Image (cartoon, rainbow, N blue to C red):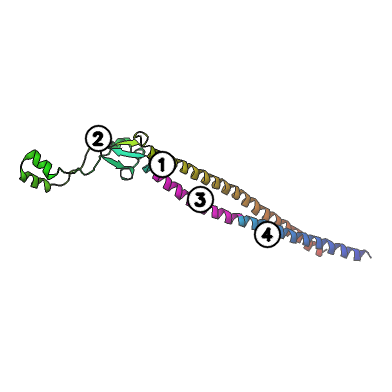
Amino acid sequence: MDWIVRIYAKLAYRWRLEAKAAEQDVQADLAQLHADQRKKTMADIEKEIVALEKVEADIAEKEKVKKGVWKCDNGHTVSMAEIGDPDDRPASAGAPQCGIPMPPATPDELKGKEGKPAWVEWAKTQTVPYCDRPLTFYTWDKLNKNEEYEDNRRSKDERKEQQAVIAGKKAYIDELKENIKGGEETAKHFRREAQRDRTVAREIKGL
C-alpha cells in the first residue's frame, strides 16, 4: 500500500512542479512581451524626437535671422541670412563690410555736375562700386520694429515649447529603458525558476 501512495505522491509532486514551471514560462513570455512592446514604443518616440529636434533646429535658425539686421552708415541694410549672427563672429574678425552695390549717378546728374557729355558716356562704362563701410548689428527692439520684435519673441517661445516637448519625451524614454530592463530581468527570473522546477521534477522521476 505504501508504494502506491509513494508513486501517487511522486506523480502529484512532479505534476505540481511541471504545472508551476509552465506557469512561470507564461509569466516570462508575458514579461518579455511587455518589454518588446516598450521597445517598439521607445523606437517610435525616438523617431518623433528626431523630427522634433529638426523642427527646433529650423526654428533656431529662423530665430537667428529674425534677431535683427546689419546696417552701415550709408543707410544700407543687410540681413542676417547674408552676414550671419554677430554672436558667431570672433572678436578678432572685426566688423564686416557692407558690400552693397553703390548705384552710379544718373547721366543727368553727371551732366549737371561736370557739364561734359563725354564724361557721362565714360561713367556708363565703369564697373559698379561696392559700399565698403563697416556694418553694425541692430536688434529689432533697438530699431523700434515692434512687429519684427514680436515675431522674434514668438519664435523664441515656440522654440522653448519644442524644447520642453523634446525633454519630456526623452524623460519618458529613460523611464521606458528602466521598465524594459526590469521586464527582461523578470522574464529571465521566471525562466530560471521554471528550469529549476523541471530539474527537480526529473530528479523525482528517478527516485
Report which residue position mark 1 lands on.
Answer: 151
Image side of residue 27 versus residue 59, left or right: right
Percent x, y of residue 97: 25, 39
Image side of residue 174 versus residue 30, left or right: left
Crowdedness near tag 1: few (<14), some (14–19) or many (≥20) residues, C-alpha within 10 Å: some
Q: Earlier in the sequence, mark 3 or mark 4?
A: 4
Tell me the kind of residue under disc 2: Asp
Report which residue position mark 3 lands on.
Answer: 49
Percent x, y of residue 70: 30, 39
Image side of residue 92 versus residue 197, left or right: left
Tell me the kind of residue under disc 3: Ile
Q: Classify mark 1: helix, strand or loop.
A: helix
Circle nearer the viewer, 1 or 2: 1
- Looking at the figure, which quarter contains the N terminus? bottom right
Callout 1–callout 2 Cβ contact below 8 Å: no
Alpha-carbon span between mark 3 and mark 4: 30 Å
Work out whether 91 lies above or below 32.
above
Image side of residue 71 versus residue 12, left or right: left
Q: Earlier in the sequence, mark 3 or mark 1?
A: 3
Report which residue position mark 2 lands on.
Answer: 73
Percent x, y of residue 107: 11, 45
Alpha-carbon span between mark 3 and mark 2: 45 Å
Residue 29, labelled with which disc? 4
Circle nearer the viewer, 4 or 2: 2
Callout 1–callout 4 Cβ contact below 8 Å: no
Q: Which residues are magenta?
A: 38-63
- Looking at the figure, which quarter contains the C terminus? bottom right
Q: Earlier in the sequence, mark 1 or mark 4?
A: 4
- Residue at the spot 79% in from the left edge and 60% down from the top edge: 17
- Residue at the spot 42% in from the left edge and 48% down from the top edge: 58
Q: Earlier in the sequence, mark 3 or mark 2?
A: 3
Q: Earlier in the sequence, mark 1 or mark 2?
A: 2
